[in-house]
Image (tube, rainbow, N blue to C red):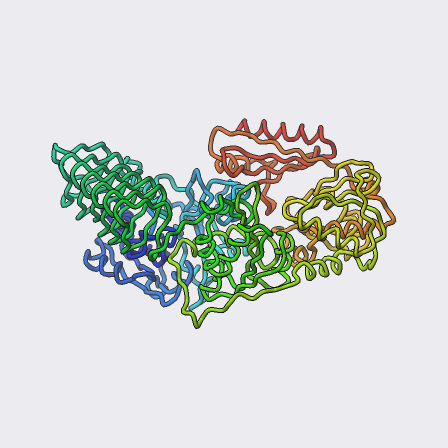
Amino acid sequence: MKAVILAGGFGTRLMPVTACCPKPMIKIIDKPIIQYTIELLKKHNINDACLTLGYLPKTIESFITANDGFGVNVSCVVEDKPMGTAGSVKQCKKFIGDDDFIVISGDSICDFDLSACIHRHYELKSEASIVLYSHPEPLEFGLVVTGDDSRIRGFVEKPSWDKVETDLINTGIYIFSNRILSKIPDETPWDFGKDVFPTLLSEDYPLFGIEAKGYWCDVGCPKAYLKCTRDMLGGKTSLEIYATAAQNPQITVKPPVFISPDAHVGTGAVIGPYSVIGQGSIVGKNAKAANSVIDGACIMDDCDVDGSIMCQGSQAMSGAKLGEGCVVGNETIIGGRAVLMPEVRIWPRQKIEAGQLVNRNIVSGALRSWPQFSEKGIMEGEYNSTITPEICFALGAAAAKMGKVGVAHAKTPSAKILASAISCGVSAAGGESFVMDIDFAAGAAYLGHTLGMGITVFVYENDGAAMISFTDERGMPISRDTERKLEAIFAGSRKLVPSESTEAANHIGGGVKLYGTAAKRLSTLGQEKINMKLNVLGDNPESFTLRELLLDLGCELVDINYGVPVFELYNGGTRLRAKNEAGHEVNWEHLMCVMSLIEMEFGKGRMAVPFEAPKVIDDIAGGYGRKVLRLGREREAEPVFTGQPWLRDGIFAALRIAAGMVLADSSLVNMTDRVPNFSTVSREVVILGKRGEAMRKLSCDDGFCRDGGPGLWYSSDKGYARVKPIVDREALMVTAECTTMEAAEELCGSIRDMIERK
């Protein structure tokens, strides 16, 4: 058995720790991660290894050579360009020869019994095995779903909580027969997770998961770096770590700590708990370092460093204070009595003046921080605090990497300022910015789609907060994968271009007219006139637009709420609710059912809906001998859904429903009466353990299954239900769909009981 160690990543999320140091060379208790990896291989009698290198390869090669490979025969392959995990391994085919091999990451820490994993691989007669680990917080990792026989049934790549159905994560440790190399093309960027494993799964290849016990940590961000350090100091791993040096009785040590023998700690200093004072570090008199890593850095007299990382050559001068989560890059100087607020990161070779208060990140001399995405591609924060023009400039520079960028904003001064900053950032990074004259979210999303934007940004306000929505080339909220890419670009150092490589923003006028023309052309089923009375509520731009379109189509708008259909837009025009002529409310889910009836009778008879759309839509289509496609279930669903904007845009939906009513010579009451009875009920179930573990246990129950959508699907004679984790707490959401409200409540209760028994 040979080993391939993947050690070529950039470590973007760890910046600025990795700005001058490749991730495998980051020290955990004064020992580089790559050393722990090689020592683990040697412990399990794997004596031949090949490293795949990319970022700062000489640093790793020199370290390995200087230490004679730590008793292992180590060779290196340096990539000229990123080849992906599988492509990197294929580069090592000469080294691998005819042997079976194990693939392991050079930038994570683990103490797994690799011998037991290899034995299990052969016991299962597996051709390809993924080593799995039960993780309490699985969102940042690829999840692997297995059957009782350990055979892999499916993958969920870095999910949001609603897609979590197990807590078993892919550790990036793989055991392969030599034959796997035939599945990887030569000289082609290729990935195990995205390319190889899905192919093996579709071919019913002997692909198994092996759950390993022990400790595993991906040192992927500063928080994980500190946690790993804390865990190792606390004895949570079986890995061998260096012993701390004997200490001067004139300092206070709060175990557990590690203090290098050649570190200098001044009189009166307080070290710990959970702190590392690494090789060559200096701690001044009366300084404090708790829950921190001081890696060849200097903190002078009276400094207070708590929960922070100081990289090699950095200095905190007398009286400086670093809050929890701070990272100070190589050779940066923090002036005396300066204060770094929590979570501040400062890139290498910067200088903070004495007494300065720093509450944002500093990259190449500029202050920066990055707000986080909430659900469905939206950033939210306080104007001029969490979301500032400066941050928006950096967001624009990051978005420029995604292709053409459409920018639009609501008609408020703050939204205009932030949108202008985003557009400037796009141009400064050498991208193409298109400022669109439209002031509501649904319109911006649709125009971005029709005009070929790689990404569209819409800025608006909501209850005083600044909001930024991002939609993709389909006019739909960007995926979590795209969010991660933006965050990674944004977190890295900003790369702007010379003036001769920049272009001024392009301005697209008449946005509302372009949008309105498309809405009438696509949604009205060929009807040039829609003669009916109705009411439209709301005093926002999207409501004004809907009224103008309806008037142009011949509708009579009346200011009454009974006897006529009443439409109301919400979520920036992306959703619609209504009241029928009897005054009964019709929600978006029921309106989707009405639109499915219209599609079957007057449209093309082919329909694609979001995965969680009501199940009764399938019954409606079935009555016409048709099948509804669902996003994420059928590949052909996405282009069909993209071509039916009324299913994601409230204005298009209103026109579609009005046209359908005219063609059917029917009232909205009659249209809704034709929809089979259904009710949905959602209930939260608080759990005592972890969400991922609870979902894994449920997935083993015969009543639950994976259907390609969020969470797990449950079917019974009472109706249908979906169970998925709640994003921000240890709880599951159960949503039941049945013919009556009472039945849906009963089904929710039954599933709640099942969860609690687990």
* Horizontal side, residue 623 vs residue 753: left or right: right
* 21, 428: nearer the viewer: 428
From this view, report whether residue 90 is shown above or below residue 377. below
Residue at the image position 52 percent from the left and 58 percent from the top: 420
* Horizontal side, residue 319 vs residue 422: left or right: left
For the image, the number of numbered tags is 0
Q: Residue furthest front?
A: 413
Could you say which quadrant of the image residue 603 lies in? bottom right
From this view, report whether residue 82 is shown above or below residue 215. below
Residue 623 in view here: yes
Q: Where is residue 668 in the image (x, y as percent from the top left)?
A: 81, 43
* 290, 42: nearer the viewer: 290
Q: Which residue lies furthest to the right in this view?
A: 665
Q: Position of residue 357 (x, y in %)?
A: 32, 44
Q: Position of residue 360 (x, y in %)?
A: 37, 48
* 487, 361: nearer the viewer: 361
Residue 115 in view here: no
* 464, 696: nearer the viewer: 464
Q: In which quarter of the image is the N terminus?
A: bottom left
* Horizontal side, residue 499 vs residue 642: left or right: left
* Horizontal side, residue 580 vs residue 60: left or right: right
Q: Residue furthest bottom?
A: 500
Could you say which quadrant of the image residue 390 lies in? bottom left
From this view, report whether residue 188 is shown above or below residue 9. below
Residue at the image position 54 percent from the left and 49 percent from the top: 377
Q: Where is residue 282 in the image (x, y as percent from the top left)?
A: 17, 45
